[in-house]
Amino acid sequence: MIPTKVKLGQYYNYSLGELFAIDFYLKNPNFQRPIVWTIEQKIKLIESLWLGIPIGTYSINILDDCEHEYHMLVIDGQKRIDAISEYRSGKFKVYDLLYSELSDCEKYRFKICKFPQYVTQSYDIEYLKNYYNLMNFGGTAHKEAERA
């Protein structure tokens, strides 16, 4: 029997600008691993954004109860959000420029880069953990020798 679809939440075709409006409020759950990306990986992600290459989606849990511990929990996309936030705060350069050194036009171009979002609304931590596991443990990591 074919299983029912996973409820990923409401899809929004958002840009980075929408992420910038909420990133201060986002919380990382304790069931995710810590930030493990290198500066080089973060730079590659930002370069992909500048080049217009899709970087996937991110998923957050937004609840009506703003005081609840699961409100604004990042379910998927923590490392990508962290890389974008660190770039905006000047922790590393991309194309030999800090974010603060960009012109207003360049900052606008960056803010309109697409980074779609899924929003769940769950008070069930087991559901949120299962969602995380489904999004992060289904594939096999590539080896360096398998690059195109």
Image (tube, rainbow, N blue to C red):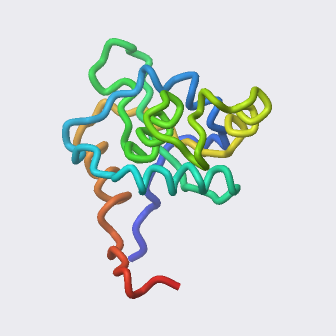
Return the residue nearer the eye: 29 or 141: 141
Q: Position of residue 127 (x, y in %)?
A: 29, 45
Q: Position of residue 32 (x, y in %)?
A: 24, 45
Q: Going by the image, does 84 lie left or right of 131?
A: right
Residue at left offset 59%, top offset 33%: 99
**Image height of 53 relative to 90, above or below:** below
* Outermost front residue: 96
Residue at left offset 44%, top offset 27%: 62
The number of numbered badges drawn on the structure is 0
Q: Going by the image, does 11 lie left or right of 69?
A: right
**Image height of 105 relative to 4, above or below:** above
Residue at left offset 34%, top offset 28%: 27
In the rendered image, the quadrant that contains the N terminus is bottom left
Q: Position of residue 50 (x, y in %)?
A: 67, 50
**Image height of 137 relative to 115, above or below:** below
Q: Dividing the picture into quarters, in which one does residue 40 lie?
A: bottom left
Q: Dividing the picture into quarters, in which one does residue 105 lie?
A: top right
Return the residue nearer the eye: 41 or 14: 41
* Outermost right residue: 105
Residue at left offset 64%, top offset 30%: 101
